[in-house]
Amino acid sequence: MNEFLERKVRLTWGEQKPTYDVVIIGGGGHGLSTAYHLATRHGITNVAVLERKYIGGGNSGRNTTVIRSNYGVPESIRFYQRSVELYQRLEEETDRWIMHKQKGILWTVHTEAGLRQERARSFINQANGVNTEFLTPEEITEIAPEIDLNVGGGKYPVLGASYQAAASTARHDRVNWALAEGAMRHGVDVLQRTEVIDLIRDGDRVVGVRTNHGDISAPVVVSAVGGHVTRIMDMAGLRIPIRTHPLQAFVTNHYERKFDPIASSLDLGFYVSQTARGEMLAGAHIDQQPSYSYRSGHHFLSSIAHNIQMFLPFMRDLRILRQWTGICDMSPDYTPIMGRTPVDGLLITTGWGTWGFKAIPAGGEAMAELIATGRTPELIAPFSLDRFRNDRTLADRSSSGTH
Amino acid sequence: MSQMFDFAGTDVAFIDGDSVLTALVRAGIYPAGGGALCCEGDCPHCVATIDGISYVRTCQTAPHENLKVQPHPIDDYPPLPPDRGYGAPPIEYRQCDVVVIGQGESGREASDRATTSGRMVESFDANRGEEVIGIYDGPMVIARTPERIIHVDCEEIVVATGAAELQPACPGNDLVGIVTGRAALRLVAQGVGLGVTVAVGKPPNDLDCEVVEGTLVRFEGVDGRLAAVVTRTESGEERTPCDTAVLNLGIYPRDGLARMGNGLAVSVVGDAGRDATVPPCPSEGVICPCNNVDVDDLQAVWDRGFHEIELVKRATLAGTGTCQGMACMPYLRSFLADRGAALQPPFTARPVARQLTIGEMSAGEYDRPVPRTPLHGEHLALGATMDRIGGWWRPWTYGELGAEYEAVRERVSIGDVSTLGKMIVSGPDAESFLEYIYPTNISTIESGRSRYVLMLNERGYVFDDGLVSREADGTFSLTFTSGGASHAEMWMRDWGSKYDVRMLNQSMSLAAINVTGPLAKELLAKAGVVDPPPYMGHADVQVAGVPCKVFRLSFTGELSFELHHAIDRSVELWRSLLDLGGEFGIYPHGLEALQLLRLEKGHILVGIDTDFDSTPRRIQHEWACKIDKPTDFLGRPSVVRTNEIPLDRLLVGFRTERPTVDGALLYSNGEYCGYVTSAGWSPTLGHGISMAWLYHGSDGQLPGDVEIDGTTATRVPMPFYDPEGVKARA
Amino acid sequence: MLEVLAVTRVVAAPDSLDRATFPSGSIVLRTAPDDAMVIGGGTVQVDDLHAIVREDAGWSGVWVNRAPSEAYLQASCSWPRPSVRPAFAQGAIAHLPVKLWLTEERTLFVFPTALTADFVERTPQEWSA
Ligand SMILES: Cc1cc2nc3c(=O)[nH]c(=O)nc-3n(C[C@H](O)[C@H](O)[C@H](O)COP(=O)(O)OP(=O)(O)OC[C@H]3O[C@@H](n4cnc5c(N)ncnc54)[C@H](O)[C@@H]3O)c2cc1C
């Protein structure tokens, strides 16, 4: 027996049918959440989620699970805040333990420019109902005495931090499963080892998908395939402004649970938190070279190790257990892309890059509403694909913070 | 005389050939409690905290006199270690043709074969204290030894890691006194007494013990120690009392590194490459000793639909502990195969194959280099606070913001702008190339003159700005922003590859000092410059004996001369200027003052006042974007297209009566309508000034006056200071 | 001894640069097809009308005997150096952009002077003494 055994979730797998009302490609968090919300909010249950591997086998089962809403543009702050709130209720709603835990997130700054940027973040957050504060070094020490304020012998002095106390983490797998189970319970078919190899077109419309197990027709097809989105869009003859970049993370062995917050330094390029199982979990920025490769890199590990032990000296003697890689659908403005595409019948939810785990509840909720009502919910209207054509991008690089 | 190491305060003797584990077992100590010991680094049953580092396999660690060993907590996690300051072992880089991992029989053969065929070979073996921690792209192998980290680039990797002996999966498998066959041999060889010993399965040849009949059912114990082995034979259960049980349950390939190297030039030899036949499915007992997962746990999740090996792993956490699945993988697979879910491949093998600390992983790492200007020492001597700005160390302030500002506005000052990007472009296509790069007319720049330029990307968004100057010899001198220079250089080389041009980057070779203030000309005159260039002109002249290219332009709003010169003459020039300027009340200015001075002039700082989607129109720089110029330029189609779209926001200036700060928000009738990108208090004007993004209202109109920080902000045209530019042109 | 190097940079069409004549006794590092770094001063003759020839004060260097330089590189340079000497090589060493001129007896490490502080911090003390 171990305390982290999944004790409740029951997964009931469907059988592939020739037609559905909605086909969702991708059994990651966003695909499952869309199905879940279609079923639970709109009574739309003749839905299939097609997953080429196993559910949560993409980024939704590889991420570092940071949930926060301290973004830099009002449209994003409001959207992510909705997701933060949905996460706070998700355990109750699904009656499943997703190990949701409030931790607070520190974004430390080490230059004057960084200080101004994070102070600005606290203003725009507070104006949009998110309580991000700007902390002094002394206040940082109160929250995380382990941080060396004189990082690197003073090369990277900690000058302050923005701090969102409501930031949290949750166990990624359990989020995926709770949503999958909820959808399945209403009759949604979740089909694993089912890969979409082509889209079926009728004139200008997409009317179904071709899978390794045969064709499926559906009036609505949703692409929720994470870093593979450009491949699906290619099947529809569409080019979208997404580049896929690998993103890596690592965990240490298990230690006494003592480090409470999520601590991050954009300048030093990493963030770290301690999991419920006592592992120190660390991530960094994307690999600069676009790629679909899941192979882990050594330089990522050594460079982050170096920076981390300067910042949190106790970590020097922790042993690294495992590293891994996901491939991220990076949008040029670091903001998601959700909604219709120029091809009728084909919807997308993408641009989740390195930051989309936190968006799973709100993203699925909004996509479901769009599918059910045919109207784009106001919350995600700014995230439409045509913003790039319309010169209405939502630049927010400094907030993507890779987590 | 025997030597000792410390285990939790007591001395433990060790002899030649011991590992920490064999010495501990000889003393009757089991650092991590019970469980079947393998003595080969496969199982998690011998881990301990050694010299403050937890999860160290004692069987892979050689003892020495000063070693301090602590037991691994049984029902808890080890404590977080104390802060020992920064530390990393040395790294060694090697190159060879073939890396052979594992030096058992098949590994030695592989090494010999490769050596004989004239290839350069590196080999590693955990038994020699060389643990390979991962195979990466390259291919490249990273290994750790007690002294150092070794990094090998090679053509090819041979994995010869052999096979591990199976762990028992039955009740009682966590007792003390269970060992694998190989472990038994090692212990005996070190003179460790095993007491009454029985074997389950065929024991190693040299081991003297009774073999129990039948298949293993469970181990029975007293006080955590093995007391008997229970097996099932045709006649029923049989109980054999013993002190030690030696197991031969079969072997399972150590294929982790081989799988990690999938897709790379990796081959597998010997037992590591054998077919992984799975053992019979266990019916009870712990299968994952790291995370304490038993067969009932597997069944519980199986019954609720978790059938994929990855899902079972994640739902139980089997395989995610310190041995990374070495103990449980065979049983996970047999459990699932037994339930008809086909034999699934093992889950992905990921680095690190053997664990190492974050300190060890930092080997060979350094801080990101931060260049310094030649005047770094001068700034420090003047008491400057240095900050990393645009990737350089730069003086933020000399401690006297007011004096710095005042010197510029009222007398004369010098500032270090050596960090500017600088480039020479020449070649038959130089002009047409620059016409394509810049949205400004280049052909009309006369020799000896300069022009302010924006740089646009294909989307028509501003990513840098600077100056283009035409030289008498037909070449062009360019400047870029400090922070944007390396990107700009790549940009130039990338697009320039289609043109017949030559480029020389001089960013780190030339220093630059900005002489600015109403008395700048007087100071230059004292430094021997009698005929300084006109506004937006430049000339090669000696300043205080130092050859300089003097550009006349103005960022501060005052009369300014930028003196570009070789970095080895910079200190000399800086000191001369300070000396000569003494009578004018010269005082240097840092970046903080400069940011205020340029704000008064409404000059943008790319990256601070602009975002990645700033079009020339949005930042009110259409004057620097000549849509109608005769030649095409980068970003033009996008600018033409986006210019048709109604504007949504504008970078504008505000005046406030109270100071505001960067990032402060704008409200119009209570509605959010933008934010401040740069703010300051203008000592000259006596009011607050800020540059801000102002959004159009839902009516499509730009709000007039707004509220910032609860005070009224009046929209005013920029520049705030000297709008006619009289001072700069003086 | 760490010193500021007397460098002339010559950027020219590659074939012109191939034909160029460099002062005797100088070290010519061909850092790119169209770029040569001439250490030691003197006049370069290159037949490209558009060549950019400039004194370049931006570089520093240190000569190190072969054995200690090899020992250092083994712990700081992840890429293989040419086995035949004299040779030129460039790349990241201790995460700094470094150019190497390798002769039978010695190795010259060349780096931007702006990174001297970092270079000194990452190399043996006696090099900068
Ligand atoms: C290392 C790492 C750390 C991260 N940390 C954070 C964090 O801390 N906080 C945060 O908010 N976000 C984080 N993220 C980002 C986050 O994980 C993702 O944005 C999010 O999980 C995206 O979910 P998704 O459902 O869109 O994509 P995925 O979870 O990748 O799901 C897409 C699924 O589609 C399947 N698929 C692909 N092609 C096909 C096909 N042709 N047919 C059928 N199925 C297909 C894939 O197998 C996959 O399962 C991180 C990401 C990584 C890699």
Image: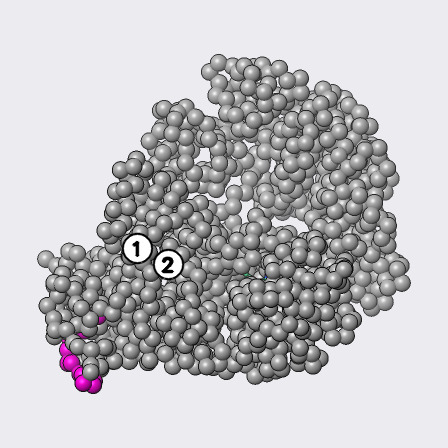
Residue B256: assigned label: 2
Counting residues from the start of the chain, the first of labels 2 and 1 encountered is 1
What kind of residue is marked 1?
Answer: Thr
Q: Which mark is residue A201?
A: none
**Contact flag, marks 2 and 1 (Cβ < 8 Å):** yes
Which residue is at a point 76% across and 60% down the rendered structure image? A203
Ligand 1 lies in quarter? bottom right
As helix, strand or loop, the secondary structure at mark 1 comes to loop
Q: Tell me if I can see residue C63 in this picture.
A: no
User: Is residue B634 toward the left or the right of residue A291 in the image?
Assistant: right
| Element type where label 2 sits in the image | helix
Q: Give residue B466's quadrant in the image.
A: top right
Residue B142: % across, % down:
38, 49
Closer to the camera in the image, A202 or B86: A202
Mark 2 on the same chain as mark 1: yes
Magenta segment, prevailing SS (helix, strand or loop):
strand
Q: Is residue B407 left or right of residue B247?
A: right
Q: Which amino acid does label 2 sit on?
A: Gly
| Magenta residue span | B235-247
User: Closest to the observer: C109 or B261?
Assistant: B261
Q: Which residue is drawn at 13% across and 61% down?
A: B189
**Residue C76 seen in the current view:** yes
Q: Which residue is drawn at 48% across and 21% down?
A: C27
Residue nearest the viewer, comparing B331 with B325? B331
Is residue B460 shown above or below C8?
Answer: below
Q: How is the image coloured?
A: one colour
Question: From what the image shows, is residue B136 above or below residue B701?
Answer: above
What label does residue B161 carry, if any? 1
Check mark 2 vs ligand 1: CB closer than 8 Å? yes or no.
no
